[in-house]
Image (spheres, helix red, strand yellow):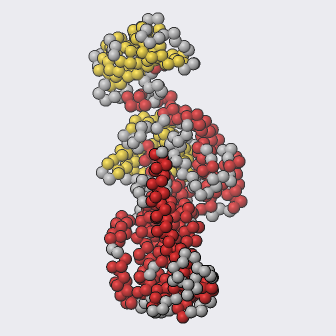
Amino acid sequence: MATVHFREIVKNYGKTRVLHGISLDITDGEFVVLVGPSGCGKSTLLRMLAGLEDITGGTIAIDGRVVNDVDSKDRDIAMVFQSYALYPHMTVRENMGFSLRLRNEKRALIDQRVATAAKILNLEPFLARYPRELSGGQRQRVAMGRAIVRDPKVFLFDEPLSNLDAKLRVAMRTEIKALHQRLKTTTVYVTHDQIEAMTMADRIAVMNEGRIEQLGDPLELYDRPANLFVAQFIGSPAMNIFDGVTRAGAVEALGARWPANGRATDGQRVRYGIRPEHLEPAASGIPAEVIVVEPMGAETEIVAKVGDTALTVMMRGRSSAGPGEGIFLAPQAAHAHLFDAASGQRL
Amino acid sequence: MNRYWREARLWLVAIPVLLWTLLPIYHIFLFSISTKDSAFSGALWPDHPTLRNFGTVFRQEHFYLHHFWEQIWNSLWIACAVGVLTLFIATCAAFAISRIKVRGGRTVMNAALFTYFIPAAFLAVPMYKAMGTYGLLNSRWSLVLAMVTLASPYAIWVLKQASDKLPWELDEAARIDGATPLQLFRLVYLPLMTPSLVAIGTYALLLAWNEYLYAFLLLSHENTIPLAVGLGHFLASDDSPWELLMATALIYAAPPAAIYYAFRRYMVGGLTAGAVKS
């Protein structure tokens, strides 16, 4: 177990700068998720921590030791790859014990460590099989087993669930989280899937274009996004956002008055944001026209038009409204978000 | 109807090609089981087929065959040495260029490609001169070195292309697992490259086994030449023992056929790997 510190990390590929001075402190035993769209630099940052990419500027420290010039194998980390990267010519047992074999550990110790890891991951029946004889989820577990066997200071996960189908992804998500709670090893996890980030992380770093847009625990990011990017990236379905102008404590937008609780001066141009579940159908309020109704059982998602803008509404229970019908929307003032129209920063 | 016609056309091409290929081999076989008198009778099957020619060859009971076992041993020794050396050089080069990405790798690959433009025959005389300078003429090593030189560029090219197809994550996983480059080479790279290695090893081996020109030039002692050159000596006299020549030729052709048959699974896949950039 260990702490990880990124200090002003810069990365250039040729003349292109892909990371612009990232600083991030990860405490002992923490589960931190780096999330962002493809190309935001999250995988690069992880690979720099793993020692698979050179560091152009700044320092990375694991457990207080700067590792910029330390070889991957001497950093005491284990990594789970998106493609699993299992050795195809080795059995599950050999795959999991490979790192110990390279360290010339005793046969008995290797067997014991592999057996323990296999037990944790329910891989005992498959130890003699080759990777090609396993399903996607089993391969994923072997990849995790390979990491566990080493008992490293830090676990690194690079989009480990992207190759799995939706159902398996949810199951593995739970397994990884349970594993972390059991082992308490410091973990850095990269994903582009904000739901994975929300459900697994102790803290999330939302990245965009080589910068950290916001760092915080999942609900903090959800409730108080620091800027438009985070507001749009976190949450599914995505937050409704549209242009407006502040007037007397509310926002005039789409031909209606929207309640607000942000600190904006009168007459300021803003972007108004409200999550679908904070916009409820009501007996009176802002008139809207229903476009689509998507019942999901416990909840119902309604896409409705206010003026020319389509908004998403998420209501608990079921709706009797049909396409083309008029409804009224009641936004919850306490959950409205205001962003500066020019900078996109939270007001 | 259309399908039958297409099938028929295929047969129309296939049968002549098959005959064209098999006829000389049948001819060799026919000669080898005929007696000296009936060898040129023109019959499709000899009146008194015999295996005595093979016995004569194995017991070295003819002037031209006095060194048969020695020469076939030379062939074998040279072919195996060429196979092993080419494989060693090409594998190391491919690993260094493709996986470790050493500087100058591209230049080596371009140079390897460039050697295709020079026909082997052009290099025969310079090679003879070079071997003479190093005092290697008439040593089996001269032929081994020459053949390795000729086989390596193609071998490097094919193995490099095959290496490029191995997932890069495996190297990274091995590095994180604590593998040194040599361990990566031995424990991960070599096992995964086996099909290509078998194909390339066989290619080099057969290239050397079948070589005539260089063997003829570089080796001239009866006890250093490979059997391919020894076979050529049969034609030195006016009255060549054709039945023995063909029996020896058949024996000489057997090992390559056996090797090719044994490794046919690897040959097609291994040699076409890297044929197209994917």
Determine whether A277 is above or below B145 in the image. Answer: above
Note whether residue A26 is visible.
Answer: no
Between B155 and A32, the one lying in front of the other is: B155
Name which residue lies at 62% across and 41% down: A179
Q: Position of residue A42 (x, y in %)?
A: 44, 43
Name which residue lies at 43% across and 90% down: B137
Between B54 and A67, the one lying in front of the other is: B54
Note whether residue A83 is visible.
Answer: yes
Q: Position of residue B252 (x, y in %)?
A: 54, 79
Determine whether B71 is above or below A345 in the image. Answer: below
Residue reaching furthest bottom?
B63
Total tally of numbered discs in the picture: 0
Q: Position of residue A27 (x, y in %)?
A: 53, 43
Q: Is residue B262 left or right of residue B200?
A: right
Name which residue lies at 60% across and 42% down: A137
Name which residue lies at 56% across and 14% down: A317
Determine whether B85 is above or below A242 in the image. Answer: below
Q: Position of residue A106 (x, y in %)?
A: 68, 62
Determine whether A290 is above or below A127 in the image. Answer: above
